[in-house]
Each structure stands twice: as structure tokens, then as C-alpha cells.
Amino acid sequence: MKKLLAVMAALLLIFSGCAPKVAQDPDIAAAKALAERITGDSSRKMEFRRIDSEKDVFRIESQGRKIIISGNNANSMAVGLGHYLKYYCNVDVGWLAWDKTTMPKQLPQIPEPVEISARVSDRFFLNYCTFGYTMPWWHWDEWEHFIDWMALNGINLPLAITGQESIWYRVWTELGLSDEEVRSYFTGPAHLPWHRMLNLDRWGGPLPKSWLDGQEQLQKQIVARERELNMHPVLPAFAGHVPVALSRLYPGAKIERMSDWAGFEDSQRPHFLDPMDPLFPEIQKKFIEKEIEIYGTDHIYGIDLFNEMIPSSWEPDYLARVSRQTYESLAAADPEGTWLQMTWLFYNERQYWTPDKIRPYITSYPSEHSILLDYYCEKMEVWQRTERYYGVPYIWCYLGNFGGNTYLAGNPKEINARMENTFVNGGDNFRGIGSTLEGFDVNPFMYKFVFEKAWDFDAHKDLDVYARSVADSRTGKADENARKAWEILFNEIYDGITVPGHSPLMNLRPSFGRSSSYHSSLRYSYDNDRLYEAIRLLLAADGKGSAYEFDVVNLTRQWLSNIFDSLTFEYKEAYDARDAVRADSLRKKMTGILDDMDELLSTQTYFLVGKWIADARGWGSTPEEADYFEKNARDLLTSWGDRGNILTDYANRTLSGLVSGYYRPRWELFFNAVDTAIAEGTEIDETALVKAYEALEYAWWNERPGTFPAEPSGDGPSAARRIISEYGADEDAYQN
């Protein structure tokens, strides 16, 4: 009787709609939520399922009208979704929140099931610098979309260093430092990456307490969502960087001032606590415990001791001792901890970091608790000069961008060859693919290409076929004109790697000698006529979507920049000949290009300096704080630090508002100096000109003249059509 009553009760619950719900698989729930955010109503026609596999794998197939996407976890399911969107729907999902996704009305069927496995277990993304050159002003809406982008591209090891200053604030104040001592030790927000890398203290401080609190809340959201999507956030740990005021509380501690960096004043040089000092593991433990309490942990920590800095000794025994003690402090705080570090220093200071020094530094602690990032593999694969890092696990990384500069660069053929060689000859300790871009740049397809190489499928093995897939997804449809355009881009335009200072001349301090900007590089070997042809073909394709409009504007931006560069060289010839008429004619054409460039860029959110400034101001809790953040935001893109800093223009970008409000006025100073020199029969007064530049630059970020739109206006393809028609037909204005 009791059994009968129980059955009847269960039936009653079912028919009343109150039956107990079976808990949904969290990975499936996370993948469904991602699909809804990216594809909207189309997600209702998708179903996600789990595959039991120890290896990352996804499968996509059609069942009736449903698209079935299966994977061993949410991250693999997301990659399956991204694969379906690109290769079946011709949909390119951009990495920024305003990149809108336009789905087809009917979801395309998958003729035969497709199953693809990962070739490597780890896929790393980001760079300390990205948090300054691209992401310092982001709020949750931008982070949410970007984390989805990372999942769609299979990234499972993201650098997650937002909000660490709030942890450090607790550590330092609990040790006895004052609020003012701690907040003044930090730099301004956009400069925090170089504070975190032990390069710089105090510049742009003190950091407002509201910033610390806001970033802490943001980091909680970031790591929670990353973990939902089966990512393992790489959190920071203690690397020896301490406030100089700590010496007041611990006069016996072995604290030394680090070497000079980028010409900043001695008062802004950081201080380093020797890992052998008993205070080092104490601080490490305090920091890790508080970080875990607030942000949780996946037991992977980024620690970089000597990035662009000189150790106090180059003795191999010292280097081994420092790294061993650093690891032991981490292991004492988290016995499961793995130390992840970038090997940029082995490239950048390669004259010092010879194999006899690298080996003891990276092998003095257990390799199973170590991951190395081979940081700039398109330029130098350090694994090839260190016997595959002597067996220590490493990740092959494509850097791709310095300073967030806006310049067409990338070499998919060479990158493809290098990566395939690493898969074959990189050793058993080669464990992943990554990208370490300093800033989001104008070649987004390159990063998707790199991460697709982490998966075993045929599309990227034939680059001609791959170029067509890029054309289809970024144009929003299969079109022969677009395919021909991308064939030109892949085979002729994208033929070189990124280098520091990859910038058009219009963005740099004008000079007839070596640019007075710290970095400047005009390295491209393609024919600008061929870039023109690619633009013409893309316009003929009449594509749709954010990616298409961005590409048209971006390519036209570069083509017009190249014309400006050519006119600059002609302008020097006119100056050398003291030809005032020719110089005046060229001046008018160059200022015309600057004006047209600003109009073209104003059509795309990506190219608005007003957006950068508005986002910075959005972090201010008072008008005074908003002004503070704006000043910091303006400074990074221009002077970088104080006036006359050697990093001036390092982070230059071709942005609407920056062209009209900053670069054009600076060129006017130069044009006036040239006119005066020609009229008076003298040479340009370089000393006076540099002082004039410095005054203008200082006023732009310190006094903040001018306001600039934060929303795009106009139609990008229409502006591009007008520009290529005007300049392409003007032989005097357009010469290679």
C-alpha cells in the first residue's frame, strides 16, 4: 500500500508540473548561456551535449532542424560553436563588445558530423601590457564579451591580473604602511602593467581608493565567468616588488633599488626584496592567502622577476638561488602552485641571458611546477637556442603587436611553418599555443589563426583554402571579389612580422632626420597598389557585418597612411631644394590626408580616441576622479610618461580625434618650421621644434584640450569609396 501511495504521489507531482528538476550539467549550461549571448534567438535551435573524453574534443552535427554541438567541457563546446559559426554560417565574432554578430535567418545544416580534437592542452592569452594598452578602462560588459571570444577560440589559460592592487593594499596596510604610502606607490591605472612587472613606481599616482574597490569587484566577475567556461585564470603572485617605505618597518630587510627603466626618475624606480630574505615568503603567504580568499585559485601564478631589468648579479649560482627561493615561497603558500613566467627577457636582454645563465634560472625548481611562455616566437623561438628549454614545459607564443600600434602586420605562412615545426620538433615538454600581444591590434584574424592551430583540422593546413574561409566569414558571405581580396592580403600584404614602432609617419613626431620618437619603423615590402586593389575588391563584394566594415576602413587607413609616408619623403626633397611652391603644395595634400583620415576613422568605434577617453572618465566617482583618469588615458597614448620621455609615441594609434586633435597640430608646428627655414634660407631649429612638440604634447594630456565623439558617425565603406576614388585617381598625390 505504501508503495502504491508513493507512486501515486510521484505521478501527481509530474502531472501538476512540480516534479523535482534534474540538475543541469554546468558545462552544458555555460555553453548554452554563451550561445545565447552570441547568437541570440538562433541559440534555440542549438543543443549542447557532453562527450566523455580526457582530451579536449568537440563534435558538431545536424539532427533534424537542430545543430548539435558536443564537447568534453564547456570550453570545447564553445570552440565547436565558434567553428560552426565561421565555417558554416560565415559569421565572424569580434573580440570587442560592439562587434555585433549577424546570424543567418536559417541555420545551415552540417552535411556530415565533424569531430576535432585539440593538439595541445594549454592555450594561453594576454600580456601584462594588454591591461594597459587595451583593457584598463573596461567594465563588465566589455569583459563579458571578450571572455566569450576567448572561449570561442579555445583559450583556457588567460592572464587574470585585474584587481590585484586591492589585495596588495590589504597586505601593505596590514604590515603597517599608511593609506597614502600604499596608494602613492601604485602608478596611474593605464601604467599599472609596468608597475606589476617591476619597471615603474609612483608615476600617475596616488591611485584612488574607488579604483581599487571597483577593480576588485570586476575581477570577481572575470574569474567566475572564466572558470564557468573551463578556463584556468593565471593570477599574480609576489615577485619581490615592495614599496620603498617598507624599509621603515623592516630596516634589516635586504631591499635594493632596481636598475633604471626607460629614463624615469630615480624616485620612480622600483625596489626589490631579495627572495632569500625571511620577509619574502611571509609576504608571499599573506598575498596568496588573501588572493585565494577573494578570487579563488586554479593554482597557476604569474611571477616575473627581471623583466627588462638587470639582476644584481649575473652569477649562475645567484640566478638559480633566486628562482629556487621564489618557487619555494610559492610552494609554501600553495603546495599545488605552478609558476608561469614569460621569457621575453631571454630575447630582449639576450646579450646577458646566455644559455649558461638561462639553464640554472629555469631548472632550479621542479619542472612539473613550471610553465614558460616562449614570448615572441615569430621573431625568435627561444626553445631552439635552449635545447627545448632543457625539458621545462613551455608554450609557443605569437606576440603580434607592440603598444597597441595600428599597422598591418603578420605573416601567416611563416607562422604556420614555425608552429608546425614546433609540433614536430618541439619536444615532449611543448605543451601549448599562446599569444602575448601588447595591445589589441588591427589584424584580428591573425590571433584566430594562431589559436585554430591548436586544433587538429584541415582548414589551416592549406593556407589558400584558409584565406577563403577568412574572406567568407569576415565578409559575411561567400563572394569571389572578397576571396580575391584576401588572396592578395595573405600572399602579398601580410608578409612581415610586427616590430616595435610599427607606425605610419603621421603618428610620429615629424622630423627630416631620425624621428625624435623613441621607436619608429616603416617596414613594409608590399606594393601599395596591391593594397589598393584588395580594398577595391572588398568594396565590390559589398559585404555585411562589423568585421567587413572594420576591414574596409582598416585597409583604407593603412593605404592612405602609406601615401602620406610617400608625400613626406617628397616634402623633404622640396625642403632640400628650397622649393617653397612645391613644399606648400605638398603641405596642403598632407593636411588633406590628415583630415580625410580623421573622417574615415570616425565611422568605427574601434578607431575613436573619444571612446578611450569616455571609458576612462567612466571610472571616476567624482568629477575630479574623472579628470584624473582622463589625464592618465591621454598620457599613455602620447607622451607615455612626462614630457620628453623616451617612450613618447610608443603607444601611438591612428584614431579619430587623435589625428585631428594631436597629430595634425604637431604636423602644423613642423610645416611652419619648414616654411620659416625655406623663407630665411636657414636650417630647421630642431631644439626649438622639439620644445614646441613637448609643450603641445604636455598640454594635450595635462590640460586636456578638446572633446571628441565617443560614438561612431557616418558609413565606413562609403567614406572608403570616396577616398580611394579621390587618391587613386590623383597621380600627383599617390606615388609609390
Image (cartoon, rainbow, N blue to C red):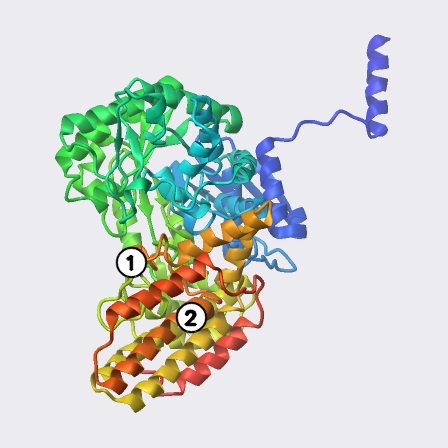
Instruction: Give the amino acid type for the residue marked by disc 2 in the picture.
Output: Arg
The vertical placement of 372 against 203, above or below, is above
Quadrant containing the C terminus is bottom left
Q: Residue furthest bottom?
A: 581
Secondary structure type for disc 1? loop
Q: Residues within 10 Å of mark 1 (few under 14, many from 20)?
A: many
Secondary structure type for disc 2? helix
User: Which circle's residue, 1 or 2, is located before the other in the chain?
Assistant: 1
Q: Residue furthest top?
A: 1
Image coordinates for residue 438, horizontal then vertical, percent? 37, 50
Q: Residues within 10 Å of mark 2 (few under 14, many from 20)?
A: many
Image coordinates for residue 396, horizontal then vertical, percent? 31, 43
Q: Residue at x 23, y 46 (%)?
A: 348
Estimate the spatial distance between the alpha carbons at disc 1 and disc 2, rounded to whole Å: 19 Å
Q: Which residue is mark 1?
A: 497
Q: Which residue is mark 2?
A: 557
Tell whether 417 sits left or right of 651.
left
Tell whether 542 sits left or right of 565.
right
Q: Nearer the viewer, residue 630 or 226?
A: 630
Q: Residue at x 24, y 83 (%)?
A: 575
Contact (CB < 8 A) between labels 1 and 2?
A: no
Image coordinates for residue 330, horizontal then vertical, percent? 35, 23
Image coordinates for residue 685, horizontal then vertical, percent? 24, 73
Q: Nearer the viewer, residue 333 or 688?
A: 688
Instruction: Give the amino acid type for the residue marked by disc 1 in the picture.
Output: Ile
Toward which corner of the image does residue 579 lie, by quadrant?
Answer: bottom left
Toward which corner of the image does residue 201 lie, by quadrant?
Answer: top left
Q: From where the camera sits, is residue 601 visible?
A: yes
Front disc: 1 or 2? 2
